[in-house]
Amino acid sequence: MSDEQIGFDIDVEQTVWGKWVDPARRAAQVRRFLDRIGLSALPPKVWEFESPEASRIGGVIADLFPDTETAVAPENSDVADQFVCFVGECFIRYAGARWYDHARYGRTSEDSDIEPVELYQGIEPGVVFDPDSGSRSYTAGYLVGYTVRYGFGGFNGTAGLILAGAMLHEGRSSHAEDSE
């Protein structure tokens, strides 16, 4: 037998989810949203929910999405996707979350007082925190609906959700280190 390998040139079509979750695509969307809200990069630590920066970001987002109809309008789909990628990256970076496809796995623990919006066809991106512990998860549609309803800054805003997730993540990480 020879050491030569047989090569196959097979085009494998990427799934809708595979295209959406592609790190380069998401990073480009985050970059575009950061430019839109006037940030050069995400800060090293999560914003305090009542910080001037969280309030300023909240004002920009409120102007972009004054209501859910605006957020889901076809002409705003790219901006809504940028926002979803931005918020998701915040949860990943600060709260240890990761992306999952809710349409495929159907796992969520969202509050029922928010009407999730439909942003994508065939997929429903979401972020999940420590899936082994049964912790929270949020879909993209929920996060957009939540942000439209409660804003970004302030105690009840999305920045508050991110901060709470970061604090829980930090607590879990500290607890894991202490038990080693």
Image (cartoon, helix red, strand yellow):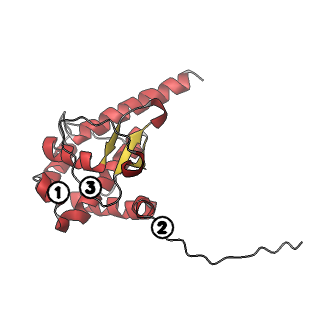
Q: Residue furthest bottom?
A: 9
Looking at this view, is 90 or 137 the one in front?
A: 137
Check disc 3 and report the residue beneath it: 83
Mark pair 2, 1: CA separation: 27 Å
Mark 2 or 3 closer to N-term? 2
Determine whether 172 is above or below 5 in the image: above
Q: Nearer the viewer, mark 1 or mark 3?
A: 1
SS of the residue under disc 2: loop
Amino acid type, callout 2 = Gln
Q: State the image quarter where residue 177 is shown.
A: top right
Looking at this view, is 16 or 172 the one in front?
A: 16
Q: Is residue 43 left or right of residue 114?
A: right
Whether residues under marks 2 and 3 lie with C-beta atoms below 8 angstroms apart, the answer is: no
Mark pair 2, 3: CA separation: 23 Å
Locate residue 41, reporting x and y percent.
34, 55
Check disc 2 and report the residue beneath it: 14
Looking at this view, is 25 or 171 the one in front?
A: 25
Amino acid type, callout 3 = Phe
Determine whether 60 is above or below 54 in the image: below
Q: Nearer the viewer, mark 2 or mark 1?
A: 2
